[in-house]
Image (tube, grey):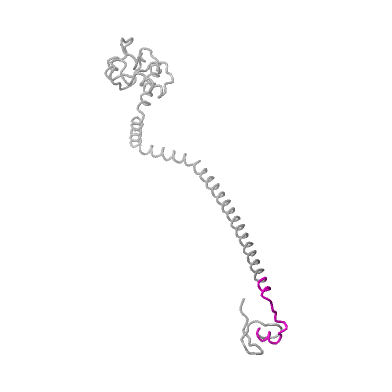
Amino acid sequence: MAEPEPRPCAKCGAAMRHRVGKGWDCRRCYQRRHPEKKRTRSEEERRAQSARDREAKRAWRERMEEQRRRGMAREKREREQQARARKRAQLRQREVWRAGAAERRRARRRAWRLSNPEKARQKDRESRERRRARNPEIFRERKRRHRARKRGQRIGAVTGEEVRQRWELWGGRCWICGRAAAEMDHVKPLAAGGAHAACNLRPICKSCNSRKGARWPLETGGQPKGG
């Protein structure tokens, strides 16, 4: 709002922007003309008024602070609701993307293998060798089970823990000669009708395994560790 144009006081000529009383007099001239309207207050009244003013200001500040806190709490709730809504939307988008990402990835892999057969076979061989180096006993167990299936022999549920226990039972020593073992052996060979089961597995060194072959029965004095 624009400030009003200043006008001169009708008595003293001082510039004034607001009218005092009914005429265009400055405050000083108005009080001189109407001394009976000049308000006089005692010191106690001024102190009481100051106290009331301070109390009113304090109450006003408290109201403003309460409104500010309520506004901040409301804004915080709104921000949290918006954040939760954005999170839910992101999760939905991620689920939609994941639903088709796996199939797209498989399609790209199939297309790459068809266009690069030699590289694909080389990559498979390298991956197989890495897995074999990390888990040699798993691959040996697969090989033994494969041989047992080919010969039509009984196949038991042999776990890696059972193979480890059989290895520790013999102390990692060959069950025939007592030297350090290199692999697990079927005591009764699969070719002789032996079963692929934990009870038919013992550690053996390579030389004894080569000499033993598929012979059965085999005379030996080997005993488990501590037996």
* Stretch in magenta: 27-48
Query: Does the magenta segment cover residue 29?
Result: yes
Residue 59 x, y percent position in the rendering: 65, 64
Viewer-proximal residue among 86 and 34: 34
Q: Residue furthest right?
A: 36
Left/right placement of residue 31 relative to residue 91 reads: right
Q: Is residue 116 above or below residue 223?
A: below
Name the image quarter holding the N terminus. bottom right
Residue at coordinates 46% horizontally, 41% vertically from top-left?
Answer: 104
Viewer-proximal residue among 46 and 71: 46
Left/right placement of residue 125 relative to residue 14 reads: left
Name the image quarter holding the C terminus. top left
* Rendering quarter of residue 138: top left
Q: Is residue 155 above or below residue 95?
A: above
Residue at coordinates 65% horizontally, 81% vertically from top-left?
Answer: 18
Residue 218 x, y percent position in the rendering: 31, 10
Residue at coordinates 33% horizontally, 14% vertically from top-left?
Answer: 223
